[in-house]
Image: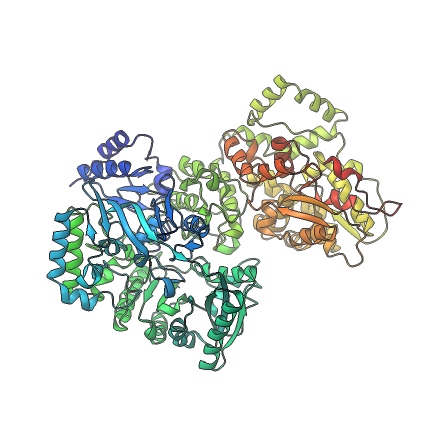
Amino acid sequence: MQVETGAVLGELERAVPGKVRTDLTSLAAYGSDASIYRRIPVAVVEPESEEDVARVVRVAAACGAAVTARGGGTSVAGNAIGSGVVLDFSRRMDRILEIDPDARTARVQPGVVLDDLRAAAAEHGLTFAPDPSTHSRCTIGGMIGNNACGAHSVVWGTTAENVVSLRMIRADGSPLTATASGSDNPELDDRLRELVAGNLAVLRTELGRFRRQVSGYGLQHLLPECGFDLAKALVGSESTCGIVTEATVRLVPVPAARALAVIGFPDVYRAAEVAPELAAAGAMTVEGMGADLLAALRSRPGKQDAGQELPGGRAWLYCEAGGEAQAEAEQRAAELARLATERIDGAESLVVTDPVRTRELWRIREGGAGIVTRLADGGEAWPGWEDSAVPPENLAAYLRDLYALLDSHGLRGVPFGHFGEGCLHLRVDFRLGTEEGLAAYRSFITEAARLVAAHGGSVSGEHGDGRARSELLRHMYSRQARDCFAEFKRIFDPHGLLNPEVLVDPAPIDAGVRPGPGHRALEVTPVHALSRDGGSFAAAVNRCVGVGSCRNLDTGSMCPSFKVTRDEVHSTRGRARVLAEMLRGESVVDGWGSGEALEALDLCLSCKACASDCPVNVDMATYKAEFLHHHYRGRVRPRAHYSMGRLPVWLRVVSAVPGLAAVSNALLALRPVSALVKRAGGIEPRRGMIRFAPRSLTRRVRRRERGGATVVLWPDTFTNHLSPEVGEAAVEVLEALGYRVVLPEGFVCCGLTWHSTGQLDGARKVLQRSLAALAPHLAAGRAVIGLEPSCTVMLRDEATELLPGDGRARRLAAQTRTFAEFVAEHDGPLPFGRLDVEAIAQVHCHQEAKGSWDPDRALLERLGVDLDVISAGCCGLAGNFGFEPGHWDVSQACAERELYPKVREAAEDTLVLADGFSCRTQIAQGTERRATHLAELLRDALPRESGSPQSGSLRSR
């Protein structure tokens, strides 16, 4: 049937008004998942009820449009993308309907995030057992679609083993309930029983041979000896037979205590040999990884010391043990370690019980899917042969043959996975950007499918078949078995409308590859060096492989705008997908003039959290600056770019005219004047105006001369003209430490405001001027001390990317220190007394992303400050972002997640600490509390002449 797009969209809007998204920005954002595949949908629908789903399916069926279900979009096989209608369950159908602790079951909607269900079940001492590494953002519906497993499946089984019943919508829009003994549709059950009766031998011999055989349909659950369990048979069907709208799942008790045995082996093969024995000995997890994964992690910025606590070896197994008491768990973990070390010569082990250390170790393994998308030398690695599985006793032999196959094709890959169950994750450096590379991909994947079949295995062990492996089922199953799959599909979906091209009548494995050969309309020489990506903007954007860490709602700092909107477009991944489509030039066709890309980037706060939180270090703040530079080249910019983007110039003018700051402050205090200035400057009407300091920092400290080693205090614009009291406090502290403090002569600036608004030519000119002023200090090897975290990051990080050939920029990056770093590293006694106060600390997002707050923490603990550190990331103001029209709601919602509530609830004598000017401004305007910079706190901790700290001023904050 020919699909008429206009008719589909019109009927959908009438059927589910207000829940249909057809704008090109949204469609581009949903064009891929965590796989290498790309399909641009005609519409995205966000249903909020089973009735909505039924209406959508009925409209699609009438119009001949395909329907694909999507949860967190973390599928690595292309299971959750389609060129028809995509149903996104993650935003509105995400409710936990019931938890029955007596029956140990939960009833949930498909959009429930796994960690949310686990947290709710934990109140009853229970958990949902399957736990893939994407547990913080994957949804229960997606897990059911793929038959997800995770680390603990050795003891608690797959998703299929933990599903009790399913409620779903069939391809004709009718509801169906599937249970452990069939369905509520007798006619359908009769047809299924007939299918099983005619194929008993093939279903008994080809399916269900080992736990991680999840490829194809789970028809073995329909066998008489399995009780005709239709619910389990539909798990792993990838929404090709029906759209799940509700699930009842089994919960299991959580061990009271746990301990982790980490065992190092001489090589990955010997780790694989002993893994089944450890599983049989009662380990709750037997997770494996090779040294290649650790090398890939250590190649990341700031991760050079990762994995230092691991025992010696070239491969490791993580074996978790549980018990009713901690001593029992530790004893069992020690027994597992002893079994391995006695079995394998050269094996080493350690047992970890500290929760913090355990969590850090698990992060290495759980981050594997993202980590290994970049090899240690920076080369790209892709999914495709992502999660093959063999009977666990065959894993070592399979691994040897797989490595040999990689070598024969000249390919490299990093193995990790669920060794105790024979499941192997592997990212490979396929060269997908050329026709030759794509042909080589097909050749390798086809041979790998034959190889895993020869070892009695499955082309998929937990992620489903999707577009990556459905074609390969012919190498694994007989024609009769595949005919059974086709008939099963026809019974539920006779016209093939539900997630077509998957499992039955599959698309070729090399069709529609996202990074594959295709028309690239946009060639560009970026302003940033993009040194990690060979100067290629396309390579930088394609860092995003879609694992979805940016969709974590309750953990990590990225992505603030997604955390408050829950809109895929406003996730780091969504923005990367839109930029990729812009570069491709097929769906988003206006190149740098793209309104779609501008819309996707609009709510990016440029907080840089993704540059560190993202497993592949996508740096959307840099990509946004680059895009804005090209988008507005030769065009009139938004007024905010001229007012706030060039703020240092205007502040210098105000500062240069005696008395102008006071006059300006008085005028801006008048509501009509303030409103006029905001309108003229393109400033959000609800945002309070900043106040100018009567005298700048450079004027206040110009004549101070002291002895000692010379250090340079960087007079950033915000400290210099808006909060010079912070700079004065820093000078006092540095002089108390015995240093001579100097400020650079003339107009110096890091170029931050130009950079964040994409005025990159201006940013480079400002930086060059500043480097000239700093040249004598840099040549003398003097430390440059920053007080404003965002400006410090500009000096350390962005300057070398904007001026890659300038040796002065490299020296500046090397010689720049944060104020806390410099004080903490001081070679000599620190003169501070104890303050013994409580404090709430808002860590600046740039410092958290591109540096470390550890020196700050150490100094504060030395002062006796009892800290409560805000964990929600960016304050929401984010420089010019929170001052721009259209950003107010997101800016405030970011602060309301944790910052505002904690500050409002704090006692009057609890300090509020924030080094960022934006953070202090947001706090002042949202809570009427004044936040303190570390420099002010340290100044107050200096002894007075009487010998006690100058703490009297603290109580006024």
Q: 143 or 825: which is nearer to us? A: 143
Toward which corner of the image does residue 683 lie, by quadrant?
A: top right
What coloring was used for the rendering?
rainbow
Query: Is 595 situated above or below 507?
Result: above
Q: From this viewpoint, is residue 299 visible?
A: no
Q: 454 or 902: which is nearer to us? A: 902
Query: Is 40 situated above or below 253?
Result: above
* Residue 45 coordinates in the image, percent (x, y): 31, 38
* Residue 416 coordinates in the image, percent (x, y): 42, 66
Q: Residue at x 68, y 35 (%)?
A: 930
Q: 762 or 841: which is nearer to us? A: 841
In the rendered view, does 808 fall on the left or right side of 12? Answer: right
In the rendered view, does 742 fall on the left or right side of 163? Answer: right
Query: Is 440 situated above or below 313?
Result: above
- For the C terminus, the image quarter is top right
Q: 739 or 437: which is nearer to us? A: 739
